[in-house]
Image: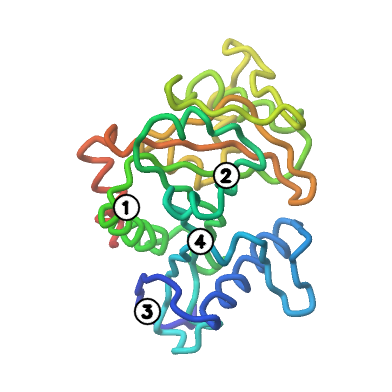
């Protein structure tokens, strides 16, 4: 491969330069790879940004083998918003797409996850597990009980996603007390096929790796998908109750498998 063995480190962004490095990675993934766009996307500087960035914590995965410059070293990112941070700005980011009242009414500690991405060179290996290990530490440090956030399928044609969306609806809905619902303006039914019509193997092959990982951890999805034409995606809202994690799932979540 011609690349030194990765030297991973996970920590929160602590400077404007590191935030811009995270936004640069997001641009490469969400704009260049997936065709997304938005009102604050800076094509000239190649930065994917929005009005919420200043309020989130940005968890970075750095590979020190690539050098000390953040624009080189940052190879993974998670954007995190705790309920106490959301209270200061009056809302969660996902409320643009989903009614979160069932979660807000639980009285439990919530955290929103978003903009998760890895540099293309680091997918399929140990990198995501290092990032999850850092996420697990953050969750423990802040006493987070429920994780949620929007995850995306590429494209805005629900018919092309009938198999995976129907699979999620029939087999992986979140428990009713935690089941958020897509907002009505772009609500997309996910039960496009009956359970009997599902080809589960074909359906799962269309499910993005990040969504599969949350399903393995015991996560579920809200009711309805949300078609986001600006970002060229069809979104589902994932919800995970950390109390429901099995011992093995906790091991995976903490990143102690696959060499992490």
Label whose residue precedes the other's in the sequence (3 or 4): 3
Quadrant into which the C terminus falls: bottom left
- The residue that label 3 is drawn on is 5
Mark sitting earlier along the chain (2/3): 3
Dot 2 corresponds to which residue? 151
Q: Is residue 251 left or right of residue 240?
A: left
- Comparing 66 with 100, the one in front is 100
Badge 1 element: helix
Q: Nearer the viewer, mark 3 or mark 4?
A: 4
CA distance separating discs 2 and 3: 30 Å
Number of numbered discs: 4
Residue at 38%, 77% (x, y): give it.
6
Badge 4 marks a residue whose secondary structure is loop
Residue 63, image x and y in percent? 42, 78
Kindly indicate the quadrant of the structure image that contains residue 159: top right
Horizontal and vertical percent for residue 198? 60, 18
Query: Could you tell me if the residues under marks 3 and 4 are in contact, i.e. CB atoms within 8 Å?
Result: no
What's the distance in space between the residues labelled 3 and 4, CA to CA?
31 Å
Judging from the image, what secondary structure is the residue with disc 3 in?
loop
Q: Earlier in the sequence, mark 1 or mark 4?
A: 4
Q: Are marks 2 and 3 in contact (CB under 8 Å)?
A: no
Q: Are marks 1 and 4 in contact (CB under 8 Å)?
A: no
User: Mark 2 vs mark 1: which is more N-terminal?
Assistant: 1
The answer for how far apart the CA atoms under marks 1 and 4 are is 14 Å
Judge the density around disc 3: few (<14), some (14-19), many (≥20) Cα neighbours within 10 Å: few
Residue at the image point whose x is 45% and y is 36% from the top: 239
Label 4 sits on residue: 56
Graded by Cα atoms within 10 Å as few (under 14), some (14 to 19) or many (20 or more), the crowding at tag 4 reads some
Image depth: mark 3 or mark 1 in front: 1
Looking at the rendered image, the disc whose residue lies closer to the viewer, 2 or 1, is: 1
Q: Which mark is residue 139?
A: 1
- Which label sits on residue 57? none
């Amino acid at each position: 491969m011609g690349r030194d063995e990765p030297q991973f480190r996970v920590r929160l962004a602590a400077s404007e330069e590191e935030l811009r490095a995270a936004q640069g990675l997001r641009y490469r993934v969400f704009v260049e790879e997936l065709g997304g766009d938005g009102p604050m996307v800076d094509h000239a500087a190649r930065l994917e940004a929005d009005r919420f960035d200043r309020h989130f914590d940005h968890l970075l995965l750095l590979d020190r083998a690539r050098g000390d410059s953040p624009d080189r070293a940052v190879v993974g990112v998670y954007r995190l918003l705790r309920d106490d941070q959301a209270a200061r700005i009056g809302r969660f980011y996902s409320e643009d797409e989903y009614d979160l009242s069932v979660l807000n009414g639980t009285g439990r500690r919530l955290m929103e996850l978003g903009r998760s991405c890895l540099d293309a060179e680091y997918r399929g290996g140990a990198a995501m597990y290092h990032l999850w290990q850092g996420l697990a530490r953050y969750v423990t440090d802040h006493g987070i009980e429920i994780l949620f956030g929007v995850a995306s399928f590429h494209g805005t044609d629900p018919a092309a996603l009938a198999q995976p969306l129907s699979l999620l609806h029939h087999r992986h809905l979140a428990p009713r007390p935690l089941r958020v619902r897509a907002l009505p303006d772009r609500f997309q039914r996910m039960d496009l096929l009956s359970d009997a019509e599902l080809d589960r193997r074909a359906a799962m092959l269309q499910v993005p790796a990040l969504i599969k990982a949350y399903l393995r951890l015991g996560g579920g999805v809200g009711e309805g998908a949300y078609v986001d034409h600006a970002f060229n995606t069809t979104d589902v809202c994932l919800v995970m109750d950390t109390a429901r994690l099995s011992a093995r799932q906790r091991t995976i979540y903490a990143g102690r498998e696959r060499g992490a």
